[in-house]
Image (spheres, rainbow, N blue to C red):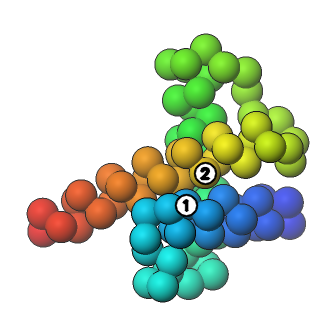
């Protein structure tokens, strides 16, 4: 559980800096974004790109988690701008 919180915070924070939302997001939002984004990134990487599954805390897992979190933030930004 602690691993997911730390991993989510790291990947969510990096993704929010890439998308430019870092100043608008707090720690809880970064953690949630990172955890959900990691699931999205892992699903895309294993099902569509044929890459191996994410396991453990390593560079590959962080990159997949950040990519999924960026995708999540871009989708959220597109939906909220239309509303």
**Does residue 6 lie above or below 74 as drawn?**
below
- Asked if residue 33 can be seen in this view, the reply is no
Identified at 76% across, 37% down, the residue is 60
In the displayed structure image, the side of residue 64 where residue 19 appears, left or right? left
Q: Secondary structure at mark 2?
A: helix
In the displayed structure image, the side of residue 81 where residue 14 appears, left or right? right
Q: Position of residue 48 (x, y in %)?
A: 50, 19
Q: Quadrant of residue 9?
A: bottom right
**Does residue 4 lie above or below 83 as drawn?**
above
Q: Position of residue 71 (x, y in %)?
A: 43, 48
Q: Quadrant of residue 80?
A: bottom left
In the displayed structure image, the side of residue 75 where residue 78 appears, left or right? left
First reached walking from the N terminus: tag 2 or tag 1:
1
The number of numbered discs placed on residues in the rendered structure image is 2
Q: Position of residue 82 (x, y in %)?
A: 12, 63
Residue lying at the far left of the rendered structure: 82
- Find out whether the residues at labels 2 and 1 contact each other: C-beta distance under 8 Å: yes
**In the foreground, 32 or 67:** 67
Residue lying at the far top of the rendered structure: 50
For label 2, the residue is 66
- Asked if residue 14 can be seen in this view, the reply is yes
Identified at 82% across, 36% down, the residue is 55
Identified at 33% across, 53% down, the residue is 75
**Does residue 13 lie above or below 62 as drawn?**
below
Q: Secondary structure at mark 1?
A: helix
For label 1, the residue is 15
Q: Quadrant of the C terminus?
A: bottom left
Q: Quadrant of the N terminus?
A: bottom right
**Does residue 47 lie above or below 68 as drawn?**
above
Identified at 53% across, 29% down, the residue is 44
**In the foreground, 69 or 23:** 23
C-alpha distance separating marks 2 and 1: 5 Å
């Amino acid at each position: 559980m602690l691993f997911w919180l730390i991993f989510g915070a790291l990947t969510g924070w990096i993704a929010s800096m890439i998308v430019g939302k870092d100043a608008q997001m707090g720690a809880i939002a970064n953690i949630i974004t990172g955890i959900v984004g990691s699931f999205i990134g892992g699903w895309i990487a294993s099902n569509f790109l044929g890459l191996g599954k994410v396991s453990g805390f390593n560079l590959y897992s962080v990159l997949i988690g950040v990519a999924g979190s960026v995708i999540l933030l871009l989708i959220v930004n597109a939906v909220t701008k239309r509303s």
